[in-house]
Image (spheres, rainbow, N blue to C red):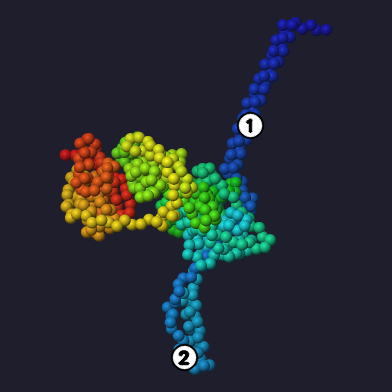
Amino acid sequence: MKLIRPERGRAAVAASRDDRAMMVRYGVAFLMVLAVMAAASASFARAAPESFAPLVKKLKPAVVNIQVTQQAGKAGPHEGFEMPQVPEGSPFEEFFKDFFDKRRRQAPGNRSLTSVGSGFVIDAGGLIVTNNHVIDGADEIRVFFSDGESLDAELVGTDPKTDVAVLRVKPNDGVTLTAVPWGNSDAAEEGDWVIAIGNPLGLGGTVTAGIVSARGRDIRSGPYDDFIQTDASINKGNSGGPLFNVDGEVIGINTAIFSQTGGSIGIGFAVPANLARPVVDQLVKFGRTKRGWLGVRIQTVTPELAEGLGMDQPRGALVAGVTDSSPAGDAGIKSGDVIVAFNGRSIDEMRELPRIVAETGVGKEVPVKVWRKGEEQEFKVTLGELEAAEKEMAAVDPEQTTEPVESSLDSLGLKLSPVTDALRDQFGIDAEKGAVVTDVAPESSAAEKGLRAGDVIIEVNQEPVSTPSDVAKQVKSVSDTKARSVLLLVQRGDDRLFIAVRLNQG
């Protein structure tokens, strides 16, 4: 029997334990590496799928082609003309009959204009979403499905401001329509794969794929622009069709393309699902939209305006005007305030505010945070309904003013006059009081900033002015403080805008 010294035995056991511990550590590290590699592999597989075919087979039955028919006119060029009286049975009778029948068929009043677009089913009961411009002015709407079936459609509701429309069809007995779900468009990131299915150029169900090229695009098509840009091929006829993510969810409605030729050059735009979905819900429920209404006219806060307002950086939406008896006016919000937060959401850019307000429920009380004269203040505002407010807007009758007394304001490079009937007629002025700009010095800061004849100055540094002398007093007051610029509130037609004008020194 071999004897083992106790000291040597303990060392061997300790060494064995150290080896096992090291193996465990290496094993854990190896498993972590494998997990990272698997996650990277899964991410890559998701970003670049081997084929879209299984997804397309699932989605395509929910995408429809839409054919719209519209009468071109009511009367043709031969309306009112009758066929000449000729002997019955004579060759002339047949000749004139064929001639006039042909002309009647070709007359604009008897011709139909047909256009095509796309859409998608969101409810198996027959609700279909498309673009407003696809069905605008339609006399007849017919929907064609991928299996060859077609159904007449009725218009449920439409919203030109977001270019969204909802149709309804009645499925045939025993037929269940395939519907597709909405996705979260806010989760879509630049570089994500997307799929467009639609009816380009009337060719029928066509599938294209691409990526999200950009988010939050403003293409000046409406007040709520927030488009997803994609390079998935979109052509005429794709309008109203769905833009899918790789989970088969609708994250956008294909609406427009940028093109110099009329064909796709890889710049397409889709209304985001998170903007379209609430609109669709309202159209289904009410047959129209019911948007929140604040009752302010706003403009972008430029670096110069931010400086004039005492802000550390440009942000928010500058209130250029407040509608009388509006939710904002009733709550105490004033012209010159900068709305920096609405209902707990920060407003970084001016164009964010209309969209956020519109999405907020009518009658809801919300906190609105504004920047006013160097500090933030918060107001509670109960929102009205935009559509109702638009119907109730009324023009204010102008009042008679004194005789014109034109004066020069050299510090701004302007000639000013009181508001008069003659100037109202000349420039189409609606303002009741203020100082009308009648001339702008060509090399002045005012000219550089776009001030022009017909503009009406109604505030100087957020103080109301009624006459040219009021403007002069306020400008002198600002100049005495050694300030470099003055903040003007100008009314131009129906719009109001703030303009920061540099003071002429000397």
The correct choice, above or below, for 138 with respect to 251 in the image is: below
Give the left or right position of residue 231, taking residue 52 as reference: left
Callout 2: few (<14), some (14-19), or many (20+) C-alpha neighbours within 10 Å? few
Specify the quadrant of the image occupied by residue 262. bottom left
Give the side of residue 210 with respect to residue 404, left or right: right
Disc 1 residue type?
A: Leu
**Percent x, y of residue 467:** 21, 48
How many marks the image carries: the answer is 2
Label 2: which residue? 85
Please indicate, yes or no, whether residue 474 appears anywhere in the rendered image: yes
Q: Is residue 165 visible?
A: no
Q: Is residue 444 left or right of residue 127?
A: left
Tell me where residue 127 sits by quadrant. bottom right
Where does the C terminus fall, quadrant-wise? top left
Q: CA distance from mark 2 to mark 1?
A: 95 Å
Callout 1: 10 Å neighbours few (<14), some, many (20+)? Answer: few
The image shows residue 35, relative to residue 410, as above or below, that is: above
Residue 325 at x, y percent in the picture: 37, 49
Residue type (three-letter) at the residue carrying disc 2: Gln
Q: To which residue does mark 1 refer?
A: 34
**What mark, if any, has residue 306 been given in the picture?**
none
- The residue at the point 49 percent across, 90 percent down is 92
In the image, residue 307 sits, relative to residue 97, either above or below, namely above
* Upstream in sequence: badge 2 or badge 1: 1
